[in-house]
Image: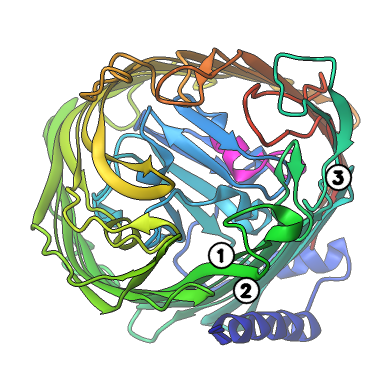
Amino acid sequence: MRTTSFCKAAVYAVFLCCAWVSAHAQVPQSSKDIAVEESAPAQDLGVTEVAGVEEYVPAEDANYTEITSAAWEGKMLSAADLLATLPGIQSYRQGGHGSFQTVSIRGIAARNILICVDGVPLNDASGGAVNLGSIDLNQMEKVEVYKSNVPARFGVSGLGGAVNFVTKNAVKKGGRVLGAYGNHNLWEGSFQVATPVTDSLMFASSFATRHSDNDYEYTNRNGTQYNDDDDYTATRENAKYTDVSGNVQFRMLHGNGYFSTLSVTAFRYEGGNPGKEEQQTKVAKFVGESALIRYGIESVGYFDDRLFLYGGVSARFDKNLSSTYYPLDHVGYGNNRFMEYGAATYKVVPEVSAEWAPVERLKGSARLALEWENAAARGDSKDWELTRWTGMGSGELYYQMFKYGGLGGEGSAQYLKDHLDDGYFVQPSGSHHLEYASDRDLTFAGRLFTRLGAGGSPLTGEVSLGRFYQQPALMELYGTFPGALSNPDLKREKATKFEASGLYRFPGNRTTFRASYFESHIEDGICWVISVELLRAENVARSLVRGAELELNSSPSRFLDVVLRATFQKTEDRSNSSTYRGNMLPGEPERSYYAEATLHLPLRLDFTWASEWRSVIYSDRANRMDQPAVDNHRASLSYRPFDKTRLTFSVDNITDEKYRNFYTPFPMPGREYKFTIIQGF
């Protein structure tokens, strides 16, 4: 078995830096000290800090939403739960805290959604959806959600939208400590601090950890969903989850006015793989490690601030392992050995980009990047190793033709080359040698759009039409999963998308209303096809998605904030198979609603109530396993005894619904509680 120590070394480095700053940072000891520090002259390090406590920052683009930490701190929300509060986004989870969780956006499957941290994609060579359950929101400053398409700054590649999690920045001296405890022995802790090292150098570090036993009770249906006589109450076993993460960041102002940022992030998670409700495991588990190093430099403005340049490089490492012992777990193929399968991936991306506005009404941006990705076997899998080189160019151009309207476009070109360094994939009867890597076509993607409304005008809107592509991932092409066959002839996935959206700000700027229509025609979608216990990726999916989103954000008084959201969509499978054609897409409801109200009470109390509902969905493409409509309600009460202290008590799933998904083999927790204290300094 091969092991990797790079991630462990990165973890230790992050934690040592956190300890160093805790010992050497000059932390204010009183409110007087804080007042003196904040009134002292400060060096502008070129970053705009998110101001205020708005949960959702208003944007001119109805397809873009920025979520601040006020939306999740102290509440019972995972990253997937948070995103699913937005219209057009559906979430999926396989159990309790830390379980596998994903989202779809406007009917586009989770595997086609780009997930980033600080602009660095987390999507890897497996081609599968990014596990949002492993993302700790306590490390994040804000979340950027692009529902229309992947923007030019991320390469305009992919069929769906993009989600960018932005970590805490080295912006302003100070910090905070968070601690939380809940039922099922849930506990969370995080620590962030930022301090100036010199007049031109800021240092920030953070540390966070989470744990849950996930030992909740559930009704075991004993494998007979329609027979209640043999049901009994069981407790979830082998479901503990723990993660730990750390981040270190330096931000420097150089003598020529340039800014540079160096950040190192490390993360590790481990949890039991509890199995299905009637067949719980004993020792099966999963372990993941990740490390990210990123350096970037930003120029001053040239030609009267008409041109800005950026250059940077990022390096990322990920290792994921799953293990099982068949005599105890009855997972995998029958044998008497402890089995461990997984993969390690390395990715390095140097890039340069520019933003320009040569004349008053014209602005644009461009990005060039080269990506090297390597994936290799870990654990008991037969040795295999795959490498992909990708060259990418993307850009955006917009011209304001007149005061209340303009035209623009985004586009990208991508070329990739795969190489088989060593290739075997595992199947029940043995192994088979991968003989060659297929050549991939040069891919062009893009969209045209028109925007209506000027900056500050009450009514703005956008209409766009685009054609997008997504290349198959390495492990989809070459079948490295246990029991999987290779398919080097996989085609790229394609989507034609039309969207029209508008945003209206009511007089007084206390209420905004958004409305969007979206339509996507998807071709050559990749699905894993099972035949005699063997897997093979095939281009068998075709679908049509049409829908509308509505959203109202209002603060009718200083005592009340209200959010109302609704999604109406029709998803249709248009594949050639008569079994699936005309059916709804799995996991996609026809309707979903979300409502939230926050009362700002006397005595510095805030009370928030949120309710959500979705209609019937199906678990399978054949639409034979329907999941009934479900609702969920959550509430939280916050108290601020001091300016930088907040206490929050939150409850999720108030009605104690334990089966939000009738057919799922992964039982869900019932009512959950959490108490959180946050202290700033």
Q: Earlier in the sequence, mark 3 or mark 1?
A: 1
Residue at 45% in and 13% down: 590
* 3D distance between C-alphas at marks 2 and 3: 36 Å
**Residue 292 visible at all:** no
Left or right: where 290 falls relative to 452: right
Secondary structure under tag 3 reads loop
- Residue that label 2 marks: 204
Name the amino acid type tagged 2. Answer: Ala
Q: Which mark is residue 169?
A: 1
Name the amino acid type tagged 1. Answer: Asn
Quadrant location of the C terminus in the rendered image: bottom right
How many numbered circles are shown? 3
Quarter of the image for residue 272 reads bottom right
* 3D distance between C-alphas at marks 1 and 2: 7 Å
Front residue of 228 and 417: 228
Q: Nearer the viewer, mark 2 or mark 3?
A: 3
Magenta region, residue range: 72-83
Residue at 14% in and 43% down: 446
Front residue of 537 and 495: 537
- Residue 572 in percent (x, y) is at 31, 18
Crowding at label 2, few (<14), some or many (≥20) Cα neighbours within 10 Å?
Answer: many
Q: In this view, does 203 lie above or below 186?
A: below
Crowding at label 1, few (<14), some or many (≥20) Cα neighbours within 10 Å?
Answer: many
Residue at 25% in and 35% down: 540
- Residue 41 in percent (x, y) is at 60, 72
- Residue that label 3 marks: 215
